[in-house]
Amino acid sequence: MEPVLQARSLVKRYGRVVAMDHADLELYPGEILAVIGDNGAGKSTLIKALSGAVIPDEGDILLDGKTVNFTSPIQARDAGIETVYQTLAMSPALSIADNMFMGRELRKPGIMGAWLRQLDRKKMEEIARQKLSELGLLTIQNINQAVETLSGGQRQGVAVARAATFGSKVVIMDEPTAALGVKESRRVLDLIMDVRARGLPIVLISHNMPHVFEVADRIHIHRLGRRACVIRPSDFSMSDAVAIMTGAMDPPEDLAA
Ligand SMILES: Nc1ncnc2c1ncn2[C@@H]1O[C@H](COP(=O)(O)OP(=O)(O)OP(=O)(O)O)[C@@H](O)[C@H]1O
């Protein structure tokens, strides 16, 4: 099977700091690939390179087997890679529907849209409502509610729904449960599994081992700017994964990258 998204030997230097040191990654169709690593291991830099926010100094990124050279996040987005950042990139005062369509607003059909540039609010609200309900986020009743009035988990839900709506190839999530309580994390984990069930592969960056072990199909362990190995959660314990991550344990020879 060909990876949907692949990084080959990516290098990124910031002065003397090597944030990526020949980093590889493969994401296969329909899977949740967790990326774990110690602070400063280079996870964010790798993910930013995949989502167009960082331009690598060396190496290749392939989407569906074809090399891509993203120079901005918009290009990655247009290619079908949606990223849910830790900061969520939302406008709190705007509504759920406005936030879902931010940057890709729908215009009214015909002259009203093309010439007068009028937005098709009704259509956007309808799609937003449909997407939220498809993902089981019906607790959010009012699509016109300002995002700032939502709980942390609901906001995360809207961000995931947005990514799932527009991501045609890949969804990347950076610490989606970091700021959430137990109940809200549960909902977001369920949501992540729903997105996978709908056929979209996911790259999930997380420090939360129980969450990673619960939802990931494979776990990419990043260390010192590169992939140390990839494990299956069923074959290893959480403490093994942490030991490999910190360097206390060598990655298994047959799995080492
Ligand atoms: N814009 C930048 N300028 C200078 N150094 C940077 C920059 N971005 C990242 N680095 C450095 O590159 C290394 C990798 O950072 P990165 O943020 O990718 O790690 P991380 O694994 O995501 O860490 P964390 O888990 O703490 O978020 C670190 O030493 C960091 O200080």
Image: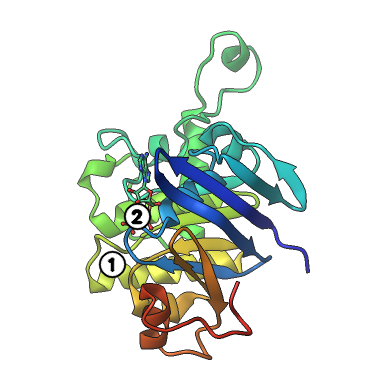
Quick one: 56 or 165, which is closer to the camera? 56
149, above or below 228, in the image: above
Q: Percent x, y for residue 174? A: 40, 56
Question: Taking 88 as reference, is 227 left or right?
Answer: right
The residue sitting at 54% across, 39% down in the picture is 52
Whether residue 162 is visible here, answered yes or no, is no
Circle number at residue 184: 1
Say which element carries label 2. Answer: helix
Name the residue tied to disc 2.
Answer: 156
Q: Which amino acid does label 1 sit on?
A: Glu
The residue sitting at 31% across, 56% down in the picture is 154
Q: Which of marks 2 and 1 precedes in the sequence?
A: 2
Q: Which amino acid does label 2 sit on?
A: Gln
Whether residue 203 is visible here, answered yes or no, is yes
Quarter that holds the C terminus: bottom right
Say which element carries label 1. Answer: helix
| Crowding at mark 1 (Cα within 10 Å: few <14, some 14-19, many 20+) | some
